[in-house]
Image (cartoon, coloured by chain):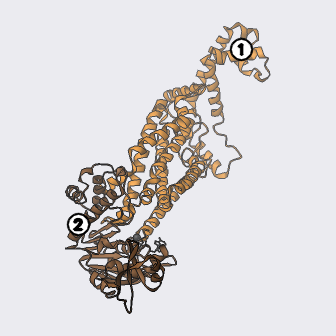
Amino acid sequence: MRVLWNELKKILTWKMLILLIFINSVLYFLLIEFDIKHFPNGSHSYSYEMGIEMIEKYGTTMDDDEFIDFKRTYAHQVEDATQYLQSREEFVEEGLDTYEKFLAYDWWNASEEIYALRSNVFFEEKVELFWELQERERLLKFYEMKDVVPDVLSKKKKQRLEELIAQEKFGIYPEVVMMNFKTFIANVGIAILFSVVLVISPAILKDRSRQLVAIQYTTKKGRNLFKTKILAGIIATFIVITALLAVYFSLYSLNNTSMYFDVRVNTFIANESWFDPTFFQFILLCIAGIYIIGLVLGLLSMAFSTLVPNMVSLIGIQIPFVVGFLIIGLYPLLPEMISIWHPKWLSMISYCAMIIIVIIFTAILWKREKKLDIL
Amino acid sequence: MIVVKDVSKQYGDFTALQNVDLEFGNGLYGLLAPNGAGKTTLIKMLATLISPTKGEIFYNGKNINDMDDQYRERLGYLPQQFGYYKNYSPKQYLLYLAALKGIGKKEALNKIDELLEKVALSDVVNKKMKKFSGGMIQRVGIAQALLNDPEILILDEPTAGLDPKERARFRHLLTDLARDRLVIISTHIVSDIESIANEIIMIRNKQLLYKDSVADICATLNGCVFETTIDYGQLEDFRKNNILLSEKQEYGQMTVRFIHKGNSEDEWTSVPPQLEDVFLYEYRDELEGEN
Ligand SMILES: Nc1ncnc2c1ncn2[C@@H]1O[C@H](COP(=O)(O)OP(=O)(O)OP(=O)(O)O)[C@@H](O)[C@H]1O
Ligand SMILES: [Mg+2]
């Protein structure tokens, strides 16, 4: 126990902690801040509010009756909008005295003056009603298309869509929260995985390059210390991931998305997935994903750390490896892990493969270490 | 008792040691050979850091690699080069190693105080090691090897970086320790061991040359070591016919110490051979290469 504790202390030093805080502050401001500070943003905030209204009024699914109610609300608002237009002389003069006319107007070919009127409503006066109506119209369109299966899809994807339609899981709830979470979690993934690699990479190499191994391996503990070092690395990885997740998710809580937690992922617009967890369960899945990828990268870092001759080559291997992994693997394995845009079992198989590979790799390294000449 | 049985070690194609047979009982053994002779190679095999390419090493009849931690817990080892954590004090460093050696914390703290006293580092117990001189680090290394009160103590060039006073203190410590355990120290400095070693081991051409007491090793040159005074001009000639061990300039003349086998001349004084003489004589080829 004392030995393990000592190794852990060697990995999680104050210096490392400061470095971690620094790196994460930089990555936070570069990658993550936007999705916290500017959420919901602009027209998205109407989407966000509308979603909450739908969940409060209709729950996490909408049946036909509820939809009729939704349309009724829309009709009321259209009337309100018409009244607003009629209260403004400029619009009446141009013949835009009902919302229907306003909506049907050929804005692409509008003269500058008329277009200015439209901008006035949306951007200067910021008449909420018009924004809300726009959002409602968008949602209505998605509702109308709820059982259309695009022809271009592969057989399996079509099958899945048909299955969802049969189960009446339509993608009709506003997707802003989901989109926001997906970018957020991908960027958090980047920050956390970089942090893990940063903390874990030097661990084993440092003792070797400082020539501590000769003394360590001739003690009673002997070469078993290698295993303890690996274990310490795993624990350190776990601690780093947990601490950073705690920080980033407390920031995420500022986005106030808990109202959406019970909505199933397939009922968000354009978010068809192979499985159907709730939004909250999906968050948990992503967290589990980060733990797995983090532990895999942590173990691989230790493996590289065991094999490379010096710090320069360690950096030389790690940077392309990690960046490559993040570019290729991060999206399919985290935010898109159950999306139908990837093969159904891709993420599952990738996760299993990664776990098996690192376990085998680590076992091989241990076998090697047991017999290795310490020169 | 350690038995080294027909051990060879190769680094790739390069043979560092060949067919070495050795036995060590209690007492102090000095491993004396010039740079690159294979001292560290032998010692690392004794410390289980590298394994013999051929042959086996036994402790009390059991293969040391099979004994595993039972061997290592009896072992104290000081590598020729060893590392430490710059921000650790000697106390922290020794505590760290004590944990690896399976020594309880309380016991370790007492032992650490005692050992740091022995190597004269009592007043820097809590100072960070990055501020230490080479000799101080070396003494921490010596203390480290003694932490577990080892039955077998193996020190690879322990006197490197020590000043004369510390060397003397260290020799005392070693004599003390060697009373009831097996101590092997490697060095290429004759004076470190000639007065204290029970036996000297010499390696030459990858093989064992001598394993004997100082007296017996010196006896191999009995009657062959002389001193005489010659003119400076004669030196070249003299060097051709004899094996020069040392030369000293005095009053425009040279006092030379040399080896001559065969008939001696009258003006030469026969002197009792010293270990240094044997060392210089046996390794004359290797040492010449260095100069
Ligand atoms: N890792 C290695 N790879 C190849 N050759 C090596 C290696 N280590 C040592 N050697 C060679 O083996 C020989 C013996 O080396 P060793 O370090 O055992 O000598 P030594 O007696 O300890 O020398 P020194 O007094 O300089 O410490 C040397 O010729 C050295 O070049
Ligand atoms: Mg050596």
The reply, left or right, for residue A228 in relation to residue A145 is: left
Please name the residue shown 59% across and 38% down the image.
A170
Q: Judge if badges 1 and 2 mark residues of a common chain.
A: no
Q: Nearer the viewer, residue A84 or A335?
A: A335
**Quarter holding residue B250:** bottom left
Residue picked out by circle 1 = A117
Picture coordinates of residue A141, whole percent (x, y) = 66, 31
Respond yes or no on whether mark 1 lies under 8 Å from ligand 1: no
Q: Which amino acid, by three-letter code, is at mark 1?
A: Leu
Label 1 lies in what chain?
A
The reply, left or right, for residue B222 in relation to residue A132 is: left
Q: Nearer the viewer, residue A86 or B61?
A: B61
Which mark is on residue B173?
A: 2
Respond yes or no on whether mark 2 lies under 8 Å from ligand 2: no
Residue A1 appears in the picture as rendered: no
Q: Colour of chain A?
A: orange
Picture coordinates of residue B148, whole percent (x, y) = 24, 64
**Ligand 2 is located in which of the four quadrants?**
bottom left
Please name the residue shown 39% across and 87% down the image.
B260
Looking at the image, how many numbered discs can be counted on the residues? Answer: 2
Distance, label 1 to label 2, CA atoms, is 98 Å
Picture coordinates of residue A128, whole percent (x, y) = 60, 18
Q: Which amino acid, by three-letter code, is at mark 2?
A: Leu
Q: Colour of chain B?
A: brown
Relative to A309, is B66 above or below?
below
